[in-house]
Amino acid sequence: LDTILRNVAEALVVTDMEDRITLANPAFMALANRPAEGMLGQALVQVLPLEALGRIVTQARQQPATPVTANVVWAGRTYQAVACTLGGREIPPSGVVTILHDITSEIEAINARTEFISAVAHDLRVPLTSIHGYGDLLLLAKEPPLTPEQRSYVAAIQRSVDRMAGLVRDL
């Protein structure tokens, strides 16, 4: 078990029922920028002063055997923190194990995708609006009047523009 805890990539910390650190893996020590002897026995919020982290550990302690999740930000990185009691339903809880998984790359990818879609939608919407507007002008023009065939062409263009605008809206 010790080998697994030392080698797991995610930051892992175990606290007792008073939120004092009883075990921390190397990834958590690196995250907190402290050696084990500098954190064992200390309150979690003193080692890693994150209000959201303290809140989910408290919630986990109050809801034995039920995982509690929240995103926390530390040193410019975003972590998904999952806390759950050790013990719980049949066995009285003896502490809380918390894992912090770095999701910064995923958050950045989601944000980049959202920005890209927003930019593409805007760049498509502008010319579609112009095309539709010019179609309206053609249909309203009195001189020279459009032939019925020309009117059907303009109406087809406007229907296509409306379909494209709907697709852009759905983006």
Image (cartoon, rainbow, N blue to C red):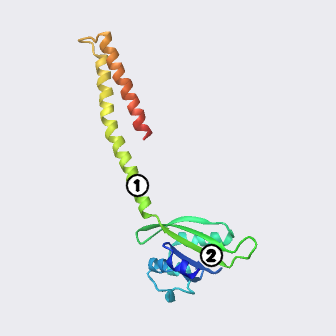
Mark 1 surroundings within 10 Å by alpha-carbon count, few (fewer than 14), some (14 through 19), many (20 or more): few
> Dot 2 lies on which element?
strand
For image coordinates 74% across by 75% down, the residue present is 91
For image coordinates 31% across by 36% down, the residue present is 126
Q: What amino acid type should be assigned to the residue bearing mark 1?
A: Asn
Give left or right: position of 122 versus 81. left
Residue 115 position, x and y percent, is 37, 50
Residue 146 position, x and y percent, is 28, 12
Give left or right: position of 157 versus 20. left
For image coordinates 61% across by 66% down, the residue present is 68
C-alpha separation, residue under disc 1 versus residue under disc 2 = 32 Å
163 over 88 or under it: above or below: above
Closer to the camera in the image, 111 or 8: 8
User: Are the residues tagged 1 and 2 within 8 Å (C-beta)?
Assistant: no
150 over 63 or under it: above or below: above
**Residue carrying label 1:** 111
Q: Residue furthest right?
A: 90
**Residue carrying label 2:** 96
Give left or right: position of 133 versus 4. left
Residue 131 position, x and y percent, is 30, 28
Q: What amino acid type should be assigned to the residue bearing mark 2?
A: Val
For marks 1 and 2 on the same chain, the one whose residue lies earlier in the sequence: 2
* Viewport quadrant of the C terminus: top left
| Quarter holding residue 62 | bottom right
